[in-house]
Image (spheres, helix red, strand yellow):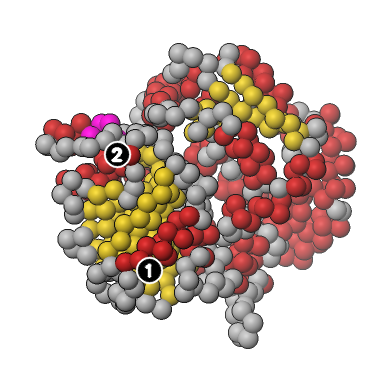
Amino acid sequence: MCGLSDFIDFRKASSHDALHNTVRMMADTLQHRGPDHGGTWIDAKTGVALGHRRLSIIDLSPAGHQPMMSHDAVYVLVYNGEIYNFRELRLQLEARGTQFFGHSDTGVILEACSAWGVIDAVKRLNGMFAFALRDRREGILYLVRDRMGEKPLYYGWTHDAFFFAFELKAILTYPALKPQIDHKALALYLKLNYVSAPQSIYKGVVILLPGTILAIPSRKRALPASAHAYWTLKDIAERRTADLYAGSEADAVTEFEVLLRNAVRLRMESDVPLGAFLSGGLDSSIVAALMQAESTLPIKTFTVGYAEHGYNEANNARAVARFLGIDHTEFHVTADEARSVIPGLPNLYDEPFSDVPQIPTLFIARLARRHVTVSLSGDGGDELFGGYNRHIWAPRIWKNVGWLLSSLQQQVARALRWVSVGSWDRIINSFEPLLPDRMRVANAGEKMHKLADVNTAADQEALYFALVSNGAGDTLFANDPGENSVPLYDRKQWASLLTLRRG
């Protein structure tokens, strides 16, 4: 976990010291992500300034410091992330005669780009990453983001400068930037519970889409309007749909276990202490079990518990840890402790999002950092394996209620909303002991009000939008002061935005 912050001054009017001071100030806002080392690289002739803060994970020596230059002095790199197959790539490069001065994955990225070209090299990377690569020969700066967008990379422009960083807080320190809230992004947040890529909460600042390479020629003042998508989830899904798995269910289970175990083993590559977050749920428990299977010593796991029984997962985590024989640590959070961190959340997360676990995530990260430098978690399991099932529910609901007349739908919706969320919870919970497990529903009141929203949908597409959002979509307006009232989106634009949802 490192931090990068950089910019291009297209006027080329700033001195070396001025460029250094600006990029150093931007990078220092990310010291919490990179406490081990800070560095800059300046090219005053072209107005390019690169800054980096390093958290050392692989190759703890100065040979792993950044910004890092390739052996032929053509490429300069600042990078955040981890390349899991860097040892395999290094062997391939060494077979071509490439020499390395350290054993970091950063050096492998550099020499891979030098040997194979940027696009081909990036396609070979297995990992999570966001990086900026300066091609000194061609005068081009490349911004690159990993396939699934695990590592963010924001960028923007003002006057005659282009700037980018791993976190928004670094961008906000750029002297010429006057940040303003983007009202349409804010409205999307209220609608979707997150700010939808490629937008950010600020005007003129966007996030690089996953699987994308953006090339910026520093010899020109115009920002290029296009970017290269080297990988898309849509392409993979369409390819797999056309070429379905031919093995049996048992074969699929065996192959999946091999893939998952290999994925966990690759992520355990580290020169610093390693652990895992453990909630006791399916995803984190599987990760912990596979980590322990790959380790000769008990791995370290961490969990956060609560006094409120309905939210406390510590008992489940403790049972899993006992069964696996791992070194487990718990931290119990009081309501006052949870409330005390809320004022600091905007500084941590940079822009608003409605992920409820953001508070326990903060506590478990603090707990883990006392013992280890890197932690694995089960986050992403629902996204990867289809655990979020609104795409399944939408056609089922439409099949059952789509035939209802509009007036009857409105009456059903009003009746559902007439009872408060809390009252629905109490009513349904009172029947829960009588219901089979498959009919028991968590957050029942919230789902009943969601059902009210979908009862007013005009078609199946609108019904799906209602399931994944808050309120009535087609009546939402978002305007800056003084602007004429205009719709936030039309349906086609909204559908495209949904496909860009960040994980």
In the figure, is residue 356 to the left or right of 146? right
Q: Nearer the viewer, residue 1 or 53?
A: 53
- Magenta highlight: main SS: helix
Label 1 – label 2 distance at C-alpha: 27 Å
Any part of residue 318 in sight = yes
Q: Can you identify the residue that label 1 sits on?
A: 18
Q: Is residue 336 magenta?
A: no
Instruction: Report the label total.
Output: 2
The kind of residue on which mark 2 rests is Ala
Whether 242 is drawn above or below 375: the answer is: below
Residue located 53% across and 16% down the image? 298
For residue 63, which numbered disc appears in the image? 2
Who's the residue at 70% across and 30% down the image?
Answer: 331
Residue 102: x and y, percent?
A: 26, 35
Identify which amino acid the numbered label 1 is placed on: Ala
Disc 1 and disc 2 in contact, CB within 8 angstroms: no
Q: Secondary structure at mark 1?
A: helix
Q: What residue span does the magenta drawing correspond to?
A: 86-90
Q: Residue at x 36, y 48 (%)?
A: 79
> Compared with residue 182, is residue 456 higher up or lower down, i.e. above or below?
above
